Image (spheres, coloured by chain):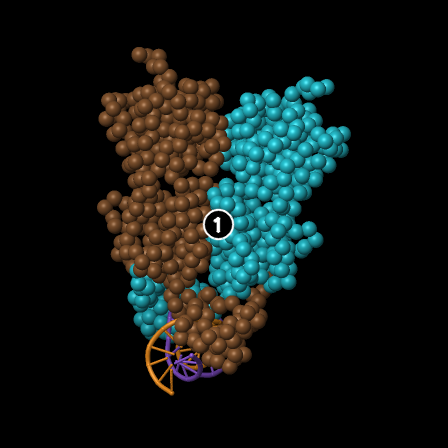
Chain colours: A brown, B cyan, C orange, D purple
DNA sequence: ATGAAAGCGCTAACAA
DNA sequence: TTGTTAGCGCTTTCAT
């Protein structure tokens, strides 16, 4: 298919038809208040008549604004099919759309980082700002943005000691809620499956263990497994690993719902009932969490809303309405059927 | 945050530093064969040294190519969190990335259609081409592209009688595979939950019913429910509706895995066992289908691959390597635990 | 093999 | 209130 060089209608044509100068048309199009109502009308009529649409490329080139936002995600397999990212992206899209911004997708892979594409995108205004969802501890390149003038917002992650903007769920709070819930149900041997490639994951783990130890549980009764893909398969594998070494676990706390679902599947394969034999708790409250069997007890964190908010903040940063953003959102418990009272300890 | 007007390095600087003209630098950057190796080296060295990055906006303006592809999806709630779209988008991203293309997200909502944004995006090269995933029968605006020179590719949908390019799973074949499977298991009263807002959904329904009727099953034993959101909740609701009117169903065929999961949840709430009391079959084989309890019998259609292929075809269309695309991909059965022999009919 | 010049479509001083 | 004049940073004839 050849490049259609068919003459598109330009601002010049409109100007000619209306007997005004191109700049007048430009001012009309940009809602300048210093244009007479009558000329404005005349121009707008012609715009409609000729079905004129401004060329965003030309606009961007001179105004240095693309009206585009980059949404960047970590380099995970099939990352856009992960409902966690999807919910956040849906929220971002919605908010961006309200302000006339478009979303450009990016994955932080080798080339993206090595070639400094992340910088180029902003420098040359392919995007006016960037939101990076759930970056990992390896994404050190982000620290470079501390010295760059380009708007960047981290979603559900942060770098200790850095001043990078972020908006995130309070994972320490999440850990406390989860730990208290399981403790109250009488669980004293709890396995943890947690992503160890994010600072938020590490926060969760550390806080969870702290709370449990604060209630007198010994370290040996709090085994944990680190993961990095956060998917069902890892949940399955890690549940297997955990139970092989600690067959007397009465509860498993997974770092997200997908891993919880994988863990439940393993337990069911082993003919262990959830929650009668082993309780399983997830995190995120993804839409399908209420449709699993049993329904998943989890931590709700409104990822869609988080997406909307992150976009709003980025836009504010962009427009100078905000100069920094460091915000934590509270998660809350959602109790369904996958957690229950601990089975009496056969060893005690 | 003010717009950083910090002078970016341009082609001119490079030219000045190398004592050549800007056009020479441009030729080097575009790998023109008519540049002497020595000058090429000199220029490239300076490019590296100054960390020069071409400005895509300026490039697009003159070359009329943005190196961007628009990925458009229907206006469903939280659409990007649907793993079905996510898988396809992941595939598209991967293939686009290999060719240096970026992905621009779009949702076919009111404004997008009414303001003819879909056309503007292509006319003004915010995107060089568009892939529309799973459009619906309401998306008549797409027919306009029959007379437009812009590359458009439909994924998993088509419009009867139109010549629009598409690549899709063969849903008629899928219906045959599913029907034969359930029929072979002895099911004679099968409920169908199917999206009726797509031609592919209608194809599936019609073919499924046809095959069953061909095997002597009466219409009254083949009740079906039409849906439009294709999610777990609709699956749940429709399973309820179906069983209320036809308590003797021995199988439910759902239009996708998410609805199948919702249906299973309803059955389990009603203390009906899957598959002993009712078999449930899904479609898509989403990654989590193997982790549900019971594991989901479904139709595999490698959505990621479909995404890759669609992008490849669009790029071919764009580059004139192909002039049209009407391709069907074969689905295949994946049997897990959610389907089994029909329960002996208590009425017979 | 390279340079000069024009221009993609628009915005933004500065004049008028 | 509107028009004139320069570009934004790049590609692309057409000369040389």
Q: Is residue B138 visible?
A: yes
Quarter of the picture containing the N terminus of chain A is bottom right
Quarter of the picture containing the C terminus of chain A is top left
Q: Secondary structure at mark 1?
A: helix
In this rendering, position of residue A253 left or right of residue A159:
right
Q: Position of residue B141 (x, y in %)?
A: 61, 57
Q: Which residue is mark 1?
A: B93
Q: Is residue A138 visible?
A: no
Q: Residue at x 69, y 20 (%)?
A: B345
Q: Chain of mark 1?
A: B
Q: Residue furthest front?
A: A37
Q: Position of residue B4 (x, y in %)?
A: 31, 64
Q: Which quadrant would residue A48 be assigned to in this image?
A: bottom right
Q: Which quadrant would residue B149 be assigned to in this image?
A: bottom right
Placement of B311 over or under A224, stated as above or below: below
Q: Position of residue B242 (x, y in %)?
A: 63, 31
In this rendering, position of residue B218 left or right of residue B109:
right
**Closer to the camera in the image, B255 or B14:** B255
Q: Residue at x 59, y 30 (%)?
A: B240
**Closer to the camera in the image, C8 or B260:** B260
């Amino acid at each position: 298919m050849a490049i259609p060089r068919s003459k598109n209608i330009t601002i010049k044509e409109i100007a000619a038809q209306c007997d005004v100068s191109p700049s007048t048309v430009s001012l009309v199009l940009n809602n300048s208040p210093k244009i007479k109502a009558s000329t404005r009308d005349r121009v707008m009529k012609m715009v409609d008549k000729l079905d004129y649409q401004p060329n965003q490329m030309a606009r961007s080139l001179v105004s240095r604004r693309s009206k585009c936002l980059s949404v960047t995600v970590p380099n995970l397999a099939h990352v856009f099919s992960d409902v966690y990212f999807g919910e956040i992206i849906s929220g971002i899209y919605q908010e961006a759309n309200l302000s006339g911004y478009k979303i450009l997708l990016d994955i932080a892979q080798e080339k993206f980082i090595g070639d400094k594409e992340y910088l180029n995108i902003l420098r040359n205004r392919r995007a006016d700002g960037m939101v990076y969802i759930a970056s990992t501890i390896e994404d050190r390149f982000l620290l470079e943005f501390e010295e760059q003038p380009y708007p960047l917002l981290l979603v559900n992650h942060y770098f200790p000691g850095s001043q990078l903007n972020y908006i995130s769920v309070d994972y320490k709070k999440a850990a406390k809620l989860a730990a208290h819930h399981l403790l109250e149900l009488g669980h004293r041997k709890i396995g943890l499956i947690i992503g160890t490639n994010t600072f938020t994951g590490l926060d969760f783990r550390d806080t969870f263990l702290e709370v449990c130890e604060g209630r007198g549980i010994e370290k040996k009764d709090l085994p944990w497994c680190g993961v990095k893909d956060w998917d069902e398969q890892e949940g399955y594998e890690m549940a297997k690993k955990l139970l092989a070494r600690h067959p007397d676990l009465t509860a498993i706390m997974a770092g997200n719902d997908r891993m919880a679902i994988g863990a439940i599947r393993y337990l069911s394969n082993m003919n262990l009932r959830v929650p009668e034999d082993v309780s399983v708790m997830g995190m995120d409250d993804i839409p399908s969490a209420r449709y699993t069997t049993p329904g998943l007890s989890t931590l709700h964190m409104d990822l869609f809303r988080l997406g909307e908010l992150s976009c709003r903040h980025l836009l504010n940063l962009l427009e100078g309405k905000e100069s920094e953003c460091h915000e934590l959102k509270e998660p809350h418990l959602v109790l369904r059927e996958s957690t229950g009272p601990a089975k009496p300890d056969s060893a005690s």
